Image (cartoon, helix red, strand yellow):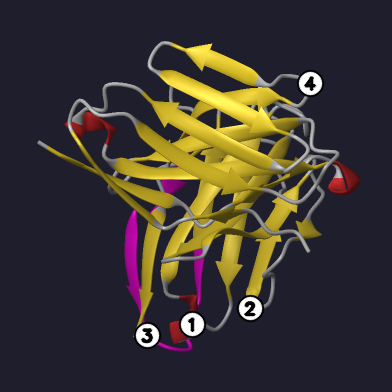
Amino acid sequence: GEDVEQSLFLSVREGDSSVINCTYTDSSSTYLYWYKQEPGAGLQLLTYIFSNMDMKQDQRLTVLLNKKDKHLSLRIADTQTGDSAIYFCAETLQNQGGKLIFGQGTELSVKP
Amino acid sequence: NAGVTQTPKFRVLKTGQSMTLLCAQDMNHEYMYWYRQDPGMGLRLIHYSVGEGTTAKGEVPDGYNVSRLKKQNFLLGLESAAPSQTSVYFCASSLTRRDYGYTFGSGTRLTVV
């Protein structure tokens, strides 16, 4: 099936690292994405990784991709209260013209 | 620098009423999408369009219709609203199918009573 799986909740203390995990299904996905949704707002593209990469770092964000296990993770270093949001993992379905399929979203709660 | 604009932002409908949600983008994007977001279910694709005058069904198209008469606009219609259509609706657009992600609108919160 076409499922992208994420855990629903994560709670961390301010200053700690957060790791949000995702498993996907389409081994031919060329791009995998992380979106952030703040309360009452739409989704914003946070970062993405091309499938021929194992890791991508962008300031406090580190994306790790394990193609063998179809596992994607997002690490946020020095998590701040402003990072509290829902984070969505998404994959492109190559056999359906690059359509995006989203996970259920992980709600990150950052406590001071 | 508007991006993707959705109207209205909120709406309450009675069962059986009809309404149209409007999505407008000013980025000259070819592809446009309508998603619904429900708690614990992520985003599910309702309909999408790969260009002006085209539409296609997504995962959950039943009870909805769409039209793309102009490239910049993508309309989502509910002909006879049902409580199961209570949701937050998001429109998105992309330049190509393999774009670096989609641009999303801020959403329409629809309640059907």
Closer to the observer: label 1 or label 2?
A: 1
Do the CB atoms of the residues marked 1 and 4 lie less than 8 Å apart? no
Which subunit holds the residue at mark 4?
A: A
Closer to the observer: label 3 or label 4?
A: 4
Instruction: Decide which of tag 3 and tag 1 comes sooner along the chain.
Output: 3
Asked if residue A91 lies in the magenta stretch, the reply is no
Do the CB atoms of the residues marked 1 and 2 lie less than 8 Å apart? yes
Pointers 3 and 2 within a single chain: yes
> Which of the labelled discs sits on residue B84, or is there none?
1
Dot 2 crowding, Cα within 10 Å, few <14, some 14–19, many 20+: some
**In the rendered image, which residue does mark 4 sit on?**
A52
Q: Position of residue B21 (x, y in %)?
A: 50, 58
- On screen, B20 above or below A59? below
- On screen, B5 above or below B84? above
Residue drawn 48% across the image and 88% down it? B16
- On screen, A80 above or below B31? above
Which subunit holds the residue at mark 1?
A: B
Mark 3: which amino acid?
A: Lys
The answer to whether residue B102 is seen in the rendering is: no
- B102 horizontally vs A27: left or right: left
> Which of the labelled discs sits on residue B63, or is there none?
2
SS at mark 1?
A: helix
Pointers 3 and 1 within a single chain: yes
